[in-house]
Image: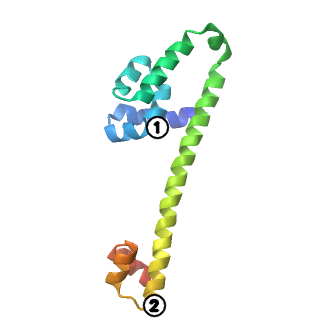
Amino acid sequence: MIYEFYMENYLKIWYSKNENEIDKYKHIIMLDLKPYELENLSKDDKVVKKYMEELERVNQNPEFREYMSAEEDNRKIENSLRSSWKRQGLEEGKKEGIKEASENIAKALFSLGMDKENIIQATGLSAKEIDNLINL
């Protein structure tokens, strides 16, 4: 299942103890942790603490336990993961678009006769990136 494949990758981040990566993905990682692991993750994080409280409250409700099958739980987790991937994809696409726009501006400025140093200042591209664009 999609969920299991990707959660395995997120859990590798958790077990690697890389604080920056854990912090970046903790709201996905927390979906597959045991309660004692959640306590470690929740230090100073209101969202994770709220999740733990709600998880405890819901698990005490017998109607919910009958309603929420493992399949339904996996489906909801997959939807959460897809939403996260979509946001991440949009961020990456935005960065690529900005880079492409800078490259197009650099080419246009070069064709207008602007020197390389001013192109670097105007676009934020490196000298090597400018050289690669000019030599195409």
The image quadrant that residue 45 belongs to is top left
Query: Which numbered tag is attached to residue 118?
Result: none
Circle nearer the N terminus (1, 2): 1
**For the N terminus, which image quadrant?**
top right
- SS assignment at label 2: loop
Q: Residue at x 39, y 78 (%)?
A: 130
Judge the density around disc 1: few (<14), some (14-19), many (≥20) Cα neighbours within 10 Å: few
Q: Considering only vertical position in the picture, is 125 above or below 20?
A: below
Mark drawn on residue 9? 1
Q: Say if residue 11 shows up in the picture.
A: yes
Residue furthest right in the image: 67
Residue 136 showing in the rendered view: no
At label 1, the amino acid type is Asn
Look at the numbered discs 1 and 2 and tell me whether their residues touch, using CB distance below 8 Å. no
The span from disc 1 to disc 2 (Cα, nearest Å) is 48 Å
Dot 1 lies on which element? Answer: helix
User: What percent of the width, then of the height, locates residue 47?
Assistant: 45, 29
Residue at 56 percent across and 38 percent down: it is 81
Q: Amino acid at mark 2?
A: Leu
- Badge 2 crowding class, 10 Å Cα cut-off, few under 14, some 14 to 19, many 20 or more, is few
Percent coordinates x, y for residue 79 in the rendering: 61, 36
Q: Which image quadrant for residue 109? A: bottom left
Residue at 51 percent across and 59 percent down: it is 94
Residue at 50% across / 14% down in the picture? Answer: 56
- The label on residue 112 is 2
